[in-house]
Image (spheres, rainbow, N blue to C red):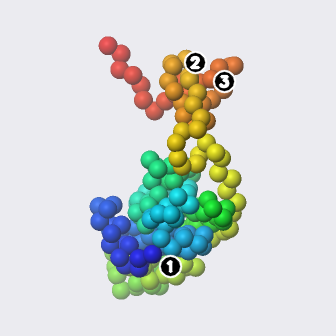
């Protein structure tokens, strides 16, 4: 794996700016891959062995994706909308998995690591670079049972919504009132059609 500074610079460029979240994400990804035994996660054959579950849609997620090579379209990046600055790294070959959570205390601890910087955001950015993994994260070994419908690769499962006729892939259909439905038909959706 490339060194931290190189990965951070590349990640910031891909993301569009350098921020504390980029530092957290790069360090989180490097540690997660180390823990599950992958040293070149973004290249073959290792890229086929990795799934990462991220629990936030913030800057750190872009950094994790950049460092590891995981992507939504590749089905190796899974978004679990918990609103927690956390990610779980899974080695599909060995089953080894670790959940890494950013410690909220690191925000306040930044003063100890970069007291000379008055701007809070810049202080956190510099402090996070200096902090150790133990300073930044809580790490827990976990078991993740990745179902066949969530595995990377071609679609294995399809269903048709009995209400709208939409094809639903990867066991994301819902059974409600004795019908097979897509989630928008079952629960409503984030969009409303424009009526003409």
Q: Nearer the viewer, residue 37 or 28?
A: 37
Q: Which mark is residue 170?
A: none
Check disc 1 and report its element: helix, strand or loop.
helix
Residue at position x 50%, y 49% from top?
75
Indicate the quadrant containing the N terminus: top left, top right, bottom left or bottom right. bottom left
The image position of residue 10, as x and y in percent, is 33, 69
Q: Is residue 120 visible?
A: no
Mark 1 crowdedness (10 Å alpha carbons): few <14, some 14-19, many ≥20: some
Please tell me whether mark 1 or mark 2 is closer to you in this view.
2
Crowdedness of circle 2 by 10 Å Cα count: few (<14), some, many (20+)?
A: few
Marks 3,1: beta carbons within 8 A? no
The x, y position of residue 142, in whole percent, is: 69, 63
User: Dot 3 surroundings within 10 Å: few (below 14), some, or many (20 or more)?
Assistant: few
- At x 37%, y 72%, the residue is 8
Q: Which mark is residue 109?
A: 1
Instruction: Choose the circle earlier in sequence order: 1 or 2.
Output: 1
Q: Is residue 132 above or below residue 156?
A: below
Element at badge 3? strand
Per the image, the residue denoted by label 2 is 162
* Pointers 1 and 2 in contact (C-beta within 8 Å): no
**Front disc: 2 or 3:** 2
Q: Residue at x 33, y 61 (%)?
A: 15
Residue 132 percent across, percent down from the top left: 52, 82
The residue that disc 3 covers is 176
Relative placement, left or right, of 131 versus 99 is: left
Count up the numbered dots.
3
For label 2, the SS is: loop
């Amino acid at each position: 794996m490339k060194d931290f500074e190189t990965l951070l610079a590349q990640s910031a460029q891909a993301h569009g700016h350098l921020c504390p979240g980029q530092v957290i994400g790069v360090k989180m990804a490097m540690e997660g891959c180390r823990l599950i035994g992958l040293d070149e996660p973004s290249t073959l054959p290792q890229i086929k062995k990795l799934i990462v579950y991220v629990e936030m849609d913030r800057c750190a997620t872009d950094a994790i994706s950049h460092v590891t090579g995981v992507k939504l379209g590749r089905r190796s990046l899974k978004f679990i909308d918990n609103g927690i600055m956390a990610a779980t790294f899974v080695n599909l070959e060995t089953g080894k998995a670790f959940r890494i959570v950013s410690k909220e205390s690191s925000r306040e601890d930044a003063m100890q690591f970069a007291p000379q910087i008055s701007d809070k955001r810049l202080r956190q950015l510099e402090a996070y670079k200096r902090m150790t993994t133990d300073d930044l994260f809580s790490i827990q070994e976990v078991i993740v049972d990745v179902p066949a419908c969530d595995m990377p690769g071609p679609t294995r499962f399809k269903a048709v919504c009995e209400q709208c006729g939409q094809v639903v892939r990867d066991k994301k259909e819902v059974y409600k009132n004795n019908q097979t439905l897509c989630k928008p038909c079952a629960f409503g959706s984030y969009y409303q059609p424009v009526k003409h």
